[in-house]
Structure formats: structure tokens, C-alpha cells
């Protein structure tokens, strides 16, 4: 083909041009995989900037971000002109004149390099190509990456090609904006907006000339010229940028001298710099959206999504404050009770060597044992060696010298909490408090931690009773119970006891028994309706965890999450409709375009009649004499005929404390306990759910009601919208309590004969010696043991009396 060209110079030039064209085509097509990736036309038209996603509450409060590179893009108009001038003067003086490749700079750079003054000639557009398409990463370099000189040449050619394409498709403003949005400024700050916030706590359009010169100067080396770590070098480099601005007449000589003398005025801005979710809520949303992102091809950490959760920022704040206030008090109480004594005991009251067990569960332990097979002292020495570490305290994070064993012992005594609030009508989760501090306790106590529910599980037994045809007014007698059943082919016997270790032998309605949390009656109800049915209705309402179908299921012997319990109680409030809670309401892209909306799925599992009766039963904790929720009277919760239903719960040995609270609008679940299950309180006066978890709910709702901007008000539950076909209005007579005996309304614990709980009404609150228990001899006629009726009290008088009793009880605790 080229032989037809007679002039050899033209022929040689044509061959040269042809070879160049072939070379660039091969480069673009990655011929034989020699050259690596080159951006396609589609890549140029839709460049990918690894932009983190933003997380918002339902009321549009930014609460966090997900990112691999901490970046928030801005438009050209949002960038101060000072930044543009400093960038052009310092990095690419002819930026507005060339088409991606500055040949004049290329020649001058070559001459300077040849004379020993090595300097680059990359334009801003070429640097953008490198940043956007990562042309210097191994995966972009093909087989030639193993040939040093050729590798560099190939990379430079690809950057030239990409720069020319960018110039052909974008304006100069677009290119400089994309560059400033992609470049790194150190300290995990990507993009000019994030850098302005990190270093000066300003918006990008508020940067002055010295600040702009400082940031642009850093681009030569973000570590070398970092103003935080190397302020002197940063000033030196800033002054070079200022001199360049003077050279190209962006500032005059007088300004140059003045700005050179100006000190660096850094002001650290508050930028969320977590890429993995440094809060329980962010971690929960990450998990919640995992499948959605996979199914729809989105990357939470790079696609610049705006995620609007269902969380109410005001309620979340009130909940976090309530948890913090109560947990500080509980931790002091826990330390006071145990003193210097270790709190780790099993259900048989045997001391547990928790620190040694925890040590052996650490991954490094097996490695050390393998390394020091015949030298256990060396293993112990490693775990006993003191080192600097930061620990959690309720007075703020503290630096200390701790060994690994010190740390295990310390955190093994720390109480934690989980709390969730749900609007079951729309299925929106309003509050999510996964623990006391995510930095130190990563485990989420809302949807990861499963603990024994204690008496908060009892409503499912009474639900099964209502479903079987019973009414809230049906009565059972509080008497000793012995249930024989088959488990794994063996005959087992269960004899539940009330928390007071006594029986009243009174007849009680189902509502009164549930309100007072009487274990023996709950066990009788469970036996009558069948424990399989209790499991069935718990699952129907929303408990997803496996439940062992045994007689003790109604007393909360199974492990469940706060999330499940709130969902299940929500079924009662939502007229029998089970709602699958949602944590995310909608997702938009970077420009605000709606990508996805989420609606809660609902399914009817209870009739409206049964669900209304369950709310009526839950109110028994406040209404019935001796109801376990009556500590709520101490808080400002009772204006405008407000009604609250609820259930306390305490597992064996006071390991777990629960409270489930229901108002006309919301369902809230609270759990309190140590992550290490062998650590627990000693008695009901300090460790039952009514003393640990209930106050968190009470403080939270008090804050919500007292906040006029919360949108939630006092008020009664709605009246039944359907005919109630069973008798339910059967108030229990109110008697003057016998003040010569200890108050024994602490009836919400799961107790199956644990000797550690060997208390009597006379010894509650004391440390007891373990003694074998014997059944008490009861009167032949239960009716004979009933107390004689006394003058009934009004509800107001009873409330005042109970408040006085609690005041005296608190004084006894202090003393």
C-alpha cells in the first residue's frame, strides 16, 4: 500500500502515522491483553466518581455516611474562585488554552529534565484521567506492566488518550470541577468540599486565598505538605502556590507579601469519617440494604446514594439520653452491689472463671499455646502484660495501662442495653439504640443479641387462652403447680414458683394474673391451652427465632431479640395486623432522583377483637392491684387520660431485665444486662426488669411527651371498633396492703427452682446462703389461706401509697 507513494519522505511519514494509529487502536482495544484497561466511550460519558452514600433520618437530618473515600461532590459554582486560580497557576497555567495535552509544557519539561531539573508536564485533564480511571493501577496495565520502561510509556499514552477524550466531551469548567471532586487532600479527605470542612470547617466557596493556596499546594504531596503533621513544609509549599498566583497575575505583589506572612489557621471540622458504620444504626442499615444493593447493582460505599431511614431524630435523641441516664445509674448500682467480688456465677450459684474462659476463646490464645507448647507461663505472661489502651467509662473514654486480662475482667462487668421503638401502623422503626457505645461494643443488642425474654413472653400464653375461647375475666387460683411432660423420650417435671416464693391461693382473673405476672397461673394457662399453641401464636405475631416447645416457654425461657419482641407486640396495637418493620423509607441518587421506596408488609394474624383484648390485658400492668408496671406512676406520663400498657420481664438470676411498653402510637422494647450471661444482679430489688429496663422506657416517654415538637401526645388507647363478644370488664377488688409484711409485687421473673433465688418476702434484697429448698406445707383448703377483705382504696390513694413505699425503699437502698 505504501509503495505507491513515490516520495520516500512522505512514504516514511505515512508509515509512521499508520503505525501510531495502529498502536493507539491496539492500546484502546487492549490487543492480546498487552496494554490493560482503557476507558471506553461510555466510561467517558458517564465517569464514576467513588462517592460515598449519605444516611438521613426521616426528618432529613444527616446522621452518617458510607464510603471508601470520604468524598462529597460539589458544583463549579460551589467552589471559591480562589481555589480555581490557585490550581491553574500552580498545576497547569495553560489549562484554558490546551486540549488535554500541553505540548509546550511537554517540551520544556523534557529540556528541564535533561538538565537535571526534573519536573512533570501532566495537565489537570491528564491528572483527572488518572484519578477517574486509575490508569496506573495494576489491573489497568496489562501484560506490559512487567516491563518497567514500557509500562510507564503505556500508562502515559493512555492518560493522553483519555485526556483528549475528556476534553472532547466536557467543558473546562466540568473538567476542573471533576478534578477537584476526585483528588485526595490527605487525612481521608477526598474532594475540595470535604477538604475545606476537614481543615478549615468551611464550605468550599468560603475558602480565602491563603487557604486555597495551602490546599492546592498539598496536591504535590499530601503527606509531605500536610498542615497537621508538617506545618512548616505546608507553609513553604503554600507560599510557592502564592508565588505562582502572583506570577500569573491572580494576586498583586502587596497581597503576595501579606499572605506569605500569614500563619496557618486550621480549624478541624466535624466530618463523619467512618467507612464501615461507626454507629449501631449505620451498621443496621448496611445489613438491611445488603440484599437490595446486590439485587439492584448498587454499591453503598461508592454510588453516592442518599438513604432516608424511618428513624425520627427527635425520638432517637430522647432514647439515647434515656439509655445513658439510666445505664449510668445501673452501672453504679452494679459496682456497689458486688464491690471487689467477682459477679460471675452460674445458675447453680457456682462461681465461674469467666476471665480465663474468655481468654481461651480469643483467636490468639490457640496460636500462643501452639508456639509455647510446654511453657504455659509464657502464654500467661502475654495476657498479663500491661499496655496502653483506651477504655470505655461513663465519665468519658479513658487512657490507661491494662493487660488483656484486665480488659476482660473490666468489660465482663459492664452492663449494656438495647432499645427499639416502632410505629406498627406504618411499620416504621422510629428508634434504634443497639448498645451503650458502638466504638467499644460492636454487638447490636436490638437485632443481633438474643436473650431470655422472661415474663415479657407471658402475653403469648394469654393470647393463646383468648384464642381458645377464654376471656380476660376467666379465673385461675394462685397455687403450687406441678407439670409432667415428655422431652426427648424422657419424663420431666416442672414446678414453677412465683418470684415471691409464695402463693396467695387467691382466684385471679387472667387480666389480673398477667398484670401481676403470676408465674403459677401463667403455667396453668399454658398447660390448659398447650405450649405448642403458645409457640404457634408467638410465631404468628412476629417471633422468628426457634422456640423450644416446653411448659416454661410462657415464662420466657427461650432466647429472642428486642426486634422480634417489638414486632410481635406491635401486632396487638395494629389491630391484629403483623407488620414487618422497615428501617429505610426511600433511596435517591446523588441528584435527588428517587431510586427506591420501601413499604412495610402487613398480614392479618389476629382478629380486631382479640388484638383489642390483648391491649386491654397489657393495661392490666397499670390498672390491676399489684401490677408490675405501676412504677410508671413516678413519671410525668399521666396527663389527659393517658394510657400505657406494658410488661416487665426478668430472666433467672436477674441476668436479663426487660420492659415492653405500648402507647396509643408506639411500641417500645428495652433490654438491659451484661453481655457475659454469668454476670448479674443479686436480687429483685436491684435487678428485675421493673428496676432496670422500665425506667428507660419511662424516661424516654416522659421526654417524648414533654417535647412539643415530637408530634406525640398523651391520650387513651382507641375504643374497640368491633363488638367485644366476651366479658372483659371485671375489676379486681382493691385491698389495703398489710404494711407489717414486705411488699412482694416483684412477680415478673422467670424462675424454675434456681437455688440462687432462694428468697422469701422477709429476706428480699439480702445476700442469701444457698440452702436446699423444700416444698412448703399448704392448708388443706386453699380458700382458708385467703386474706380477709379490708377497706377498698381509691386508685389515687393507692397510687400515693405506692409512691411513699417506693420512696422508703429507695432510702433503704441508699442506706
Image (cartoon, grey):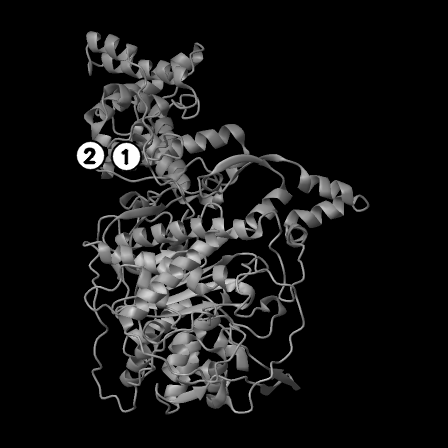
Q: Is residue 234 visible?
A: yes
Task: Determine which quarter of the picture holds residue 130.
Answer: top left
Task: Determine which quarter of the picture holds residue 735.
Answer: bottom left
Circle 1 packing at 10 Å, graded few (<14), some (14-19), many (20+), is many
Kindly identify which numbered label has been placed on residue 193: 1
At x 32%, y 21%, the residue is: 214
Kindly identify which numbered label has been placed on residue 78: 2
Q: Please give left or right for residue 151 compared with residue 15 in the image.
A: right
Question: Percent x, y for residue 608?
Answer: 27, 83
At x 35%, y 55%, the residue is: 298
Most foreground residue, 207 or 742: 742
Circle 2 packing at 10 Å, graded few (<14), some (14-19), many (20+), is some
Most foreground residue, 27 or 631: 631
Q: CA distance from mark 1 to mark 2?
A: 9 Å
Q: Please give left or right for residue 652 compared with residue 191 in the image.
A: right
SS of the residue under disc 2: helix
Q: Is residue 224 above or below residue 714?
A: above
Tell me whether circle 1 and circle 2 mark residues in contact (CB < 8 Å).
Answer: yes
Question: Percent x, y for residue 179?
Answer: 30, 33
Q: Is residue 445 above or below residue 664?
A: above
Q: Is residue 5 visible?
A: no
Q: Is residue 44 above or below residue 594?
A: above
Question: Percent x, y for residue 244?
Answer: 28, 14
At x 33%, y 42%, the residue is: 49
Q: Residue furthest right?
A: 374
Q: Mark 2 or mark 1, which is nearer the start of the sequence?
A: 2
Most foreground residue, 604 or 421: 421
Kindly identify which numbered label has been placed on residue 57: none
In the rendered image, the quadrant that contains the N terminus is top left
Amino acid at each position: 500500500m505504501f509503495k505507491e507513494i513515490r516520495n520516500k519522505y512522505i512514504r516514511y511519514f505515512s508509515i509512521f502515522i499508520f503505525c501510531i494509529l495502529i498502536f493507539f487502536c491496539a492500546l484502546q482495544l487492549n490487543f492480546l491483553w498487552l496494554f490493560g484497561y482503557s476507558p471506553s466511550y461510555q466510561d467517558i460519558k458517564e465517569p464514576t466518581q467513588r462517592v460515598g452514600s449519605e444516611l438521613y433520618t426521616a426528618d432529613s437530618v444527616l446522621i452518617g455516611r458510607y464510603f471508601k473515600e470520604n468524598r462529597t461532590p460539589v458544583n463549579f459554582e460551589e467552589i471559591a474562585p480562589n481555589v480555581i486560580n490557585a490550581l491553574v497557576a500552580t498545576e497547569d497555567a495553560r489549562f484554558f488554552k490546551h486540549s488535554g495535552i500541553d505540548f509546550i509544557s511537554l517540551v520544556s519539561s523534557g529540556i528541564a529534565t535533561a538538565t537535571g531539573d526534573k519536573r512533570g508536564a501532566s495537565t489537570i485533564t491528564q491528572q483527572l484521567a488518572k484519578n477517574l480511571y486509575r490508569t496506573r493501577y495494576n489491573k489497568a496495565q496489562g501484560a506490559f506492566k512487567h516491563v518497567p520502561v514500557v509500562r510507564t510509556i503505556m500508562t502515559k499514552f493512555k492518560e493522553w488518550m483519555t485526556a483528549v477524550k475528556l476534553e472532547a466531551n466536557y467543558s473546562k469548567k466540568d473538567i476542573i470541577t471533576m478534578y477537584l471532586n476526585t483528588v485526595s487532600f490527605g487525612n481521608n479527605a477526598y474532594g475540595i468540599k470535604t477538604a475545606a470542612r476537614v481543615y478549615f470547617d468551611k464550605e468550599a466557596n468560603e475558602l480565602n486565598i491563603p487557604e486555597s493556596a495551602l490546599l492546592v499546594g498539598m496536591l504535590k504531596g499530601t503527606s509531605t505538605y500536610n498542615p497537621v503533621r508538617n506545618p512548616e513544609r505546608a507553609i513553604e509549599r503554600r507560599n510557592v502556590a502564592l508565588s505562582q498566583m502572583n506570577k500569573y497575575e491572580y494576586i498583586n505583589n502587596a497581597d503576595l507579601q501579606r499572605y506569605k506572612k500569614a500563619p496557618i489557621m486550621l480549624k478541624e471540622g466535624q466530618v463523619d469519617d467512618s467507612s464501615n458504620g461507626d454507629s449501631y444504626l449505620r451498621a443496621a442499615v448496611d445489613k438491611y440494604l445488603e440484599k437490595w444493593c446486590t439485587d439492584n447493582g448498587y454499591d453503598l460505599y461508592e454510588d453516592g446514594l442518599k438513604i432516608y431511614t424511618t428513624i425520627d431524630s427527635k425520638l432517637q435523641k430522647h432514647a439515647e439520653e434515656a439509655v445513658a441516664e439510666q445505664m449510668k445509674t445501673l452501672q453504679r448500682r452494679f459496682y456497689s452491689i458486688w464491690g471487689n467480688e467477682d459477679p460471675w456465677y452460674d445458675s447453680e450459684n457456682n462461681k465461674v472463671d469467666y476471665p480465663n474462659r474468655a481468654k481461651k476463646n480469643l483467636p490468639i490464645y490457640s496460636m500462643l499455646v501452639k508456639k509455647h507448647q510446654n511453657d504455659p507461663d509464657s502464654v500467661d505472661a502475654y495476657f498479663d502484660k500491661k499496655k496502653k489502651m483506651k477504655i470505655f467509662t461513663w465519665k468519658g473514654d479513658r487512657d490507661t495501662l491494662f493487660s488483656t486480662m484486665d480488659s476482660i475482667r473490666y468489660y465482663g462487668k459492664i452492663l449494656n442495653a438495647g432499645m427499639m421503638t416502632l410505629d406498627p401502623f406504618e411499620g416504621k422503626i422510629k428508634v434504634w439504640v443497639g448498645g451503650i457505645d458502638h466504638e467499644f461494643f460492636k454487638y447490636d443488642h436490638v437485632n443481633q443479641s438474643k436473650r431470655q425474654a422472661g415474663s415479657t413472653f407471658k402475653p403469648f400464653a394469654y393470647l393463646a387462652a383468648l384464642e381458645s375461647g377464654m376471656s380476660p375475666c376467666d379465673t385461675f387460683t394462685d397455687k403450687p403447680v406441678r407439670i409432667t411432660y415428655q422431652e426427648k423420650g424422657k419424663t420431666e417435671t416442672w414446678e414453677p414458683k412465683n418470684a415471691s416464693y409464695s402463693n396467695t391461693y387467691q382466684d385471679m382473673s387472667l387480666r389480673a394474673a398477667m398484670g401481676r405476672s403470676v408465674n403459677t397461673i401463667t403455667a396453668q394457662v399454658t398447660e390448659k391451652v398447650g405450649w405448642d399453641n403458645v409457640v404457634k401464636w408467638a410465631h404468628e405475631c412476629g417471633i422468628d427465632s426457634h422456640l423450644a416447645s416446653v411448659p416454661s416457654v410462657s415464662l420466657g425461657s427461650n432466647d429472642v431479640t428486642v426486634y422480634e419482641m417489638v414486632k410481635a407486640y406491635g401486632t396487638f396495637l395494629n389491630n391484629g395486623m403483623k407488620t414487618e418493620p422497615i428501617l429505610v423509607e426511600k433511596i435517591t441518587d446523588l441528584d435527588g432522583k428517587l431510586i427506591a421506596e420501601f413499604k412495610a408488609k402487613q398480614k392479618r394474624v389476629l382478629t380486631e377483637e382479640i388484638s383489642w383484648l390483648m391491649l386491654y390485658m397489657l393495661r392490666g400492668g397499670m390498672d390491676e392491684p399489684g401490677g408490675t408496671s405501676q412504677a410508671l406512676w413516678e413519671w410525668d406520663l399521666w396527663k389527659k387520660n393517658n394510657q400505657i400498657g406494658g410488661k416487665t420481664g426478668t430472666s433467672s438470676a436477674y441476668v436479663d431485665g426487660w420492659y415492653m411498653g405500648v402507647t396509643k402510637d408506639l411500641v417500645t422494647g428495652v433490654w438491659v444486662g451484661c453481655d457475659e450471661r454469668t454476670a448479674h444482679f443479686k436480687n429483685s430489688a436491684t435487678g428485675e426488669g421493673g428496676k432496670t429496663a422500665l425506667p428507660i422506657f419511662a424516661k424516654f416517654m416522659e421526654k417524648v411527651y414533654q417535647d412539643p415538637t415530637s408530634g406525640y401526645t398523651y391520650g387513651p388507647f382507641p375504643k374497640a371498633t368491633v363488638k367485644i363478644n366476651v366479658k372483659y370488664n371485671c375489676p379486681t377488688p382493691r385491698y389495703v396492703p398489710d404494711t407489717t409484711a414486705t411488699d412482694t409485687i416483684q412477680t415478673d421473673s422467670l424462675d424454675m427452682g434456681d437455688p440462687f433465688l432462694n428468697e422469701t418476702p422477709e429476706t428480699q434484697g439480702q445476700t442469701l446462703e444457698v440452702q436446699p429448698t423444700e416444698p412448703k406445707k399448704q392448708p388443706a383448703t386453699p380458700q382458708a389461706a385467703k386474706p380477709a377483705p379490708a377497706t377498698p382504696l381509691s386508685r389515687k390513694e393507692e397510687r400515693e401509697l405506692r409512691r411513699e413505699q417506693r420512696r422508703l425503699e429507695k432510702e433503704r437502698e441508699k442506706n
